[in-house]
């Protein structure tokens, strides 16, 4: 599972890194106007998402928690923050976007909680790339139309949402948790984002654990447990937790 991560790279830098266009909502008079760094991104918040639309690679902010197009209530998205790599081609909520609406969710690092033998408290661990670059989490996106609310043209309001795909962990992450986000290397981005590519067997082959040597990890403070806490100190290495 991936239920908390850090998003600290500004959107203009992310757009450049992923070769994506920025929407007007994130740029004003040539100046980047994205959200401030978020060291404690939680489900249902807005997250930067790289996707393809109209043959153009784009970066925008989507609701974290996929809301299927057929959903009656968008609250269902809070239960769909992750999608299992092993079953996305079969699950009703995910098979449609897996075939046509795949995305990348950038993250500067992510948190997992490790069980400590003999202790009730879990140790939060922060994982990031050894080279300091962002992770490219594999994801799915969808558009949900709110038939009960319309815009000034009388069209249903639209909610763009996404989910992060998780799979088996590599040997390093396995020390902490039994799942990890799927991380896509740059040479797979074109294939993954191409909406005309519906070869789900080949796409499923991309959903493998990232190399262990790509990732570094260290313990952090339990302050991250509270979603209201936010700041660079959350990713600083901290002393191990104790029940005392």
Image (tube, rainbow, N blue to C red):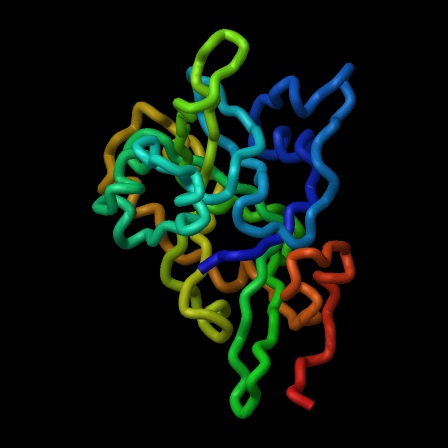
Left or right: residue 144 versus residue 198 is: right
Residue 195 image offset from top left, x and y in percent: 35, 26
Q: Is residue 156 visible?
A: yes
Q: Looking at the figure, which quarter contains the C terminus?
A: bottom right
- Name the residue located 53 percent from the left edge and 75 percent from the top edge: 114
Q: Nearer the viewer, residue 149 or 116?
A: 149
Image position of 204 with respect to 241: above or below: above
Residue 56 image offset from top left, x and y in percent: 48, 19
- Name the residue located 63 percent from the left edge and 58 percent from the top edge: 130
Image position of 241 with respect to 187: above or below: below
Left or right: residue 90 versus residue 39 is: left
- Name the residue located 42 percent from the left edge and 31 percent from the top edge: 190
Q: Looking at the figure, which quarter contains the N terminus?
A: bottom left
Image position of 51 with respect to 179: above or below: above
- Name the residue located 74 percent from the left edge and 26 percent from the top edge: 32
Left or right: residue 81 versus residue 216 is: left
Where, by quadrant of the figure, is residue 26 drawn?
Answer: top right
Residue 86 image offset from top left, x and y in percent: 28, 54
């Amino acid at each position: 599972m991936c239920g908390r991560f850090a998003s600290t790279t500004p959107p203009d830098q992310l757009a450049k890194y992923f070769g994506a266009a920025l929407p007007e909502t994130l740029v004003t008079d040539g100046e980047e106007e994205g959200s401030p760094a978020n060291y404690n991104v939680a489900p249902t918040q807005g997250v930067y998402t790289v996707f393809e639309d109209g043959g153009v690679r784009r970066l925008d902010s989507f609701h974290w928690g996929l809301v299927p197009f057929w959903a009656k209530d968008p609250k269902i998205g809070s239960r769909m923050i992750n999608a299992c790599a092993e079953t996305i081609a079969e699950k009703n909520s995910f098979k449609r976007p897996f075939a046509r609406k795949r995305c990348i969710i950038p993250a500067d690092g992510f948190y997992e909680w490790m069980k400590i033998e003999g202790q009730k408290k879990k140790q939060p661990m922060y994982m990031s790339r050894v080279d300091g670059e962002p992770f490219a989490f594999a994801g799915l996106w969808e558009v949900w139309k709110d038939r009960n609310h319309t815009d000034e043209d009388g069209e249903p309001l639209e909610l763009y949402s996404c989910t992060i795909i998780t799979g088996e962990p590599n040997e390093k992450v396995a020390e902490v948790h039994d799942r990890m986000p799927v991380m896509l290397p740059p040479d797979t981005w074109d294939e993954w984002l191409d909406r005309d590519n519906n070869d789900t067997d080949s796409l499923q082959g991309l959903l493998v654990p990232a190399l262990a040597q790509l990732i570094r990890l260290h313990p952090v403070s339990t302050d991250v447990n509270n979603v209201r806490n936010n700041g660079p100190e959350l990713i600083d290495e901290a002393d191990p937790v104790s029940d005392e």
